[in-house]
Amino acid sequence: MKLWRHILTVLMLATTLTVTSAAAADDPATVIDTLEAALMAKNVDGAVALFTDDAMAWRTPPLPNTTGTYHGKAEVGGFWQSLIALNPQFETVGQRQVTGEQVTWTSSTGLDVWRQLGIPSLITRGKATVRGGKIAAIAISIPPESLAKVQTAMVASAPTSDPLAVVTTLDATLNAQNIEDALALFADDATVRQNPAQPGATGIYTGKAEVRVFLASIVAQNIHFDLTAPRQVVGEWVMWTNNTSVDPWRKLGIAPLQGQGDVTVHDGKIVSLTITLTPASMAILQRAMAASVPVASP
């Protein structure tokens, strides 16, 4: 009798372990762990085996020349094959969040195309539906802050001897609050003129040391540029109009204001930069500043 009880106990334990193991394998977080491991091992067949026959996948933004939408195992497999070619590496940030069949996560993701731009990894986000241990739907997205890093790096990696490329790179580096890369675009004896001048400043900056002071001051105000029309290029001279926002204008409720700029670029370096507000924007600023001054009591 004791022997049969022992055998029964062993069988029950084995059954419990089998069920537990199967449940763990079907867990949505575990399935995504397995998917990422397969992709890092360049095992496309192992990755595709985790999907249902009618699975859907989305990537935002889409890869070049694609819609970013993939339907069925064949298309999903093609998507993962293109990703594997970029030598992906994933590191989960925090814990995957599971609610029923749904799992969401944040990853630090590395791809060759980003590494070549000097970006070891970027934050990406994922969401998937897992049923019976198979992925029925998955969406991978790159958040705006990660996209901005890629765009800045792409601009910075472009040849900058062309005046237009130099000015485009200047805007991108300032929007990214990268003072040193912006300063590297200026000649040693460069001159910057700003109108209106900042409080306590002349509005004229000569030489790299002073230009750095200017760049640091506008970056500290969280400056952001948005081009309103294509820049005009005549030889070494570039001119443009853009919408500009800085914290003092945001506090006055008038950002963005429209500004105009012109630059002279020689041998890939900025030798002069002039930025001004348009007359209409200057009037808006003056009215807002006047209205913000407290009225003295009689």
Image: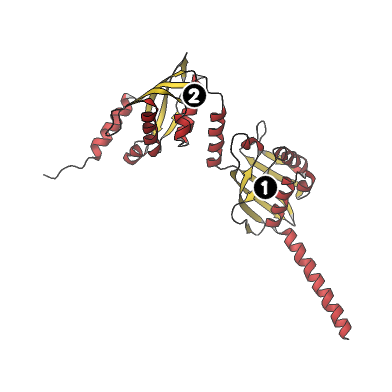
Examine the image and state in which quarter residue 295 appears.
Answer: top left
What amino acid is found at the position of numbered circle 2 in the picture?
Answer: Val
Which comes before the other along the chain, label 1 or label 2?
A: 1
What amino acid is found at the position of numbered circle 1 in the picture?
Answer: Ile
Q: Residue furthest left?
A: 298
Q: Which of 178 and 135 is in front in this view?
A: 178
**What residue is rendered at 46% in x and 15% in y?**
236
Task: Count numbered badges in the picture.
Answer: 2
Q: Is residue 56 above or below residue 116?
A: below
Mark 2 neighbour class, 10 Å CA radius: few under 14, some 14 to 19, many 20 or more: many
**Residue 276 visible somewhere in the drawing:** no
Q: Which residue lies furthest to the bottom in this view?
A: 1
Answer with left or right where residue 284 lies relative to residue 28.
Answer: left
Answer with left or right where residue 27 lies relative to residue 220.
Answer: right
Which of the two discs, 1 and 2, sits closer to the camera?
2
**Residue 158 visible somewhere in the drawing:** yes
Q: Which mark is residue 138?
A: 1
Mark 1 neighbour class, 10 Å CA radius: few under 14, some 14 to 19, many 20 or more: many
Residue 107 picture location, percent across and down: 61, 49
Answer with left or right where residue 252 lies relative to residue 5.
Answer: left
**What residue is rendered at 38% in x and 29% in y?**
211
Q: How is the image coloured?
A: secondary structure
Quadrant showing the C terminus: top left
Q: Which mark is residue 80?
A: none
Q: Which mark is residue 166?
A: 2
Q: Is residue 34 above or below residue 251?
A: below
Residue 124 picture location, percent across and down: 60, 45
Q: Is residue 75 above or below residue 227?
A: below
Q: Nearer the viewer, residue 183 or 193?
A: 183
